[in-house]
Amino acid sequence: MHGYHGKALIVDLTTRTTDWEAIPESILRRFIGGTGLGAYLLYRHCPAGIDPLHPDNPLIFVGSPLVGSRLTTSSKFAVLTKSPLTGMIGDSLSSSFIAVELKKSGCDALIIKGRSETPTFLTLLDGQVGFHDASHLMGLNTFETENAVKDQVGHWTRVASIGPAGEKLVRYASIANDGGRQAGRTGTGAVMGSKNLKAIGVRGGALPGVYDSDGLNQAARDLSSRSMGPATEKYRTLGTIANVAVFDALGTLPTRNFQQTTFEAAQAVSGEEFHENHFVKNSHCANCTIGCEKIVATKDSGSKKQGRMEYENAFALGSLIGIGDPNTVIRASAFCDEMGMDTISAGATIAWAMESFERGLLTTEDTGGIDLNFGNTESALECLRMIANRDGIGDLLAEGSLRAAQVVGSGSESWAMQVKGLEMPGYEPRSLKTMALALAVSTKGACHNRASAYEADFSAVVDRFSADYSRGQITMDGEDFSAVLDSLIWCKFLRKAFDDFFQESASVYQQITGYPMTADELRTAGERINNMKKLFNVREGWLREDDTLPVRALSEELVDGVGKGAALSREDLDMMIASYYRVRGWTVDGDIPASKLVELGLDGITQAHEVTTA
């Protein structure tokens, strides 16, 4: 077998036993790897209706055929589980050297089940699993944990770990790896914490062979050359934080919990400001030619902090909570990485709390004496500390904005800016209609990366202020394209460097695996994978009314910016959702008909013979 090992390693923390399961060629070819193969494995191994923090909810790390190939941006892995935020499918991606080491360890997926009685860290060294006491690691941040594990088992070991937020079961805790990179969204770190699993150390042996090494080497050289061209210039210069100033100018920068779309201090937390006054260096993910990560540092009189800065960090910990001080944004972002928390959900939940405080639903008695007003830098940092430790008001906010609003009530659900329980990213849906649809129907909840629908809104393809029936096809195509990206796995920042994405990817897949693959087969794989994710959600209780947006987005006009007066009605959203269901071939209620399952080869997908013991 080329490109794959053809098996998954199952580790049971309760019994401290391991098992290897064969993954048939037919499954590998249909679901590819990454989030695709992970969705299939999650459906198989996650008991229906299980609480996400129950020991039987599996935590699945999945590689891909491209990992280890030296193709630029291909060293990524996916983490899948039933999300403690949404109760539906949770998936997150990270670029990391651990992806390569996992691939070297002899498996295409690592499936972790059960719960250890005592704090534990796992090692997977040359295919051998070890269980180690982690009592001495508890309470350490993610950087400290990674270093301690390496000190104990070897510095060539790659480590994935949780911080205090994961230990405390913060529902949007992340999994850190490679010095602070995060598998950030949907609460995978909370599931890891629920298993009493502090860290995983991986060091592998040999990679599976490649079918056509000469052809692959040529493709790799060509793609590396293109990856340094105009298609990636934005990422190589300012990085994604360039979006702050651009979105502010376009009136699409969510500010003060989506109450405004421009921020008077946008320039102070813009990519230009970070680059000019706080820039330290560019950083590259494993086997990447682009180097999009921007390492920035504080420059005020306080204790120095340094970390990565992306648009979503700058938005969620800047404009969304009214913070215009770049040093505070850097400190807040670095703190989230240390504690192991998703910056988007953390910032959005604090934004909900700030608005609730200013409306009088939360008081200083509730907040432990802090004035939780928009723009209060000290309070924002203290609130993050309280969340990570579930201290005081932080215990409520650690549940995420939806659950917090359900506790507080008094109409506060209407300004909990989330979809299916997952907090919204930095895109204003009332002036980005395709994005609005994509956020509403996403199986993951409010995610900007599972359809990249904003690209259509920012192009000349559609009028971003007007809803119409064409958005269904655009959103479906974007989702299926992204599903292939996230399953092979390519980095999304490489997507425009391809001349013909599906044809080139099919060729690369065949060069690696030796399995015939066409562009049309890859397109179908994308559709199959998204239907697989939907199948999981339907099984876990998804209802038509879950495909929606927050009340604010459907009831309030924009008050500022280029789109002042723009709005999104529930009727317009429902019309676009209907168009999406139609092109998906689903029923008017959003269910998948049996004929579609047969068409995609998903009928009988849960039968035991699909994965057999090796």
Image: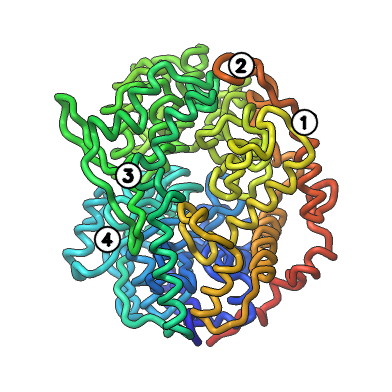
Q: Which residue is mark 3?
A: 337
In three-dimensional space, the C-alpha distance between marks 1 and 4, rounded to whole angstroms, equals: 52 Å
| Residue depicted at x 69% and y 66% | 524
Left or right relative to 261: residue 131: left
Are the residues tagged 1 and 3 within 8 Å (C-beta)? no
**Kind of residue at badge 2:** Lys
Q: Residue 517 at what x, y percent from top left?
A: 62, 76
Q: Which mark is residue 564?
A: 2
Q: Residues within 10 Å of mark 2 (few under 14, many from 20)?
A: some
Q: Residue 77 at what x, y percent from top left?
A: 44, 63
Residue 375 sits above or below residue 308 on the image: above
- Tag 4 secondary structure: loop
Q: Residues within 10 Å of mark 3 (few under 14, many from 20)?
A: many
**Kind of residue at badge 1:** Asp
**Kind of residue at badge 4:** Ala
Q: Quadrant of residue 137?
A: bottom left
Residue sitting nearer the eye, 433 or 30: 433
Q: Earlier in the sequence, mark 4 or mark 3?
A: 4
Q: Earlier in the sequence, mark 3 or mark 2?
A: 3
Q: How many marks?
A: 4
Q: Earlier in the sequence, mark 1 or mark 2?
A: 2
Q: Earlier in the sequence, mark 4 or mark 2?
A: 4
| Residue depicted at x 23% and y 30% | 277
Q: Quadrant of residue 132?
A: bottom left
Left or right relative to 604: residue 120: left
Q: Which residue is mark 1?
A: 572
Left or right relative to 430: residue 332: left
Q: Which residue is mark 4?
A: 134
Q: Earlier in the sequence, mark 1 or mark 4?
A: 4
In three-dimensional space, the C-alpha distance between marks 4 and 3, rounded to whole angstroms, equals: 20 Å
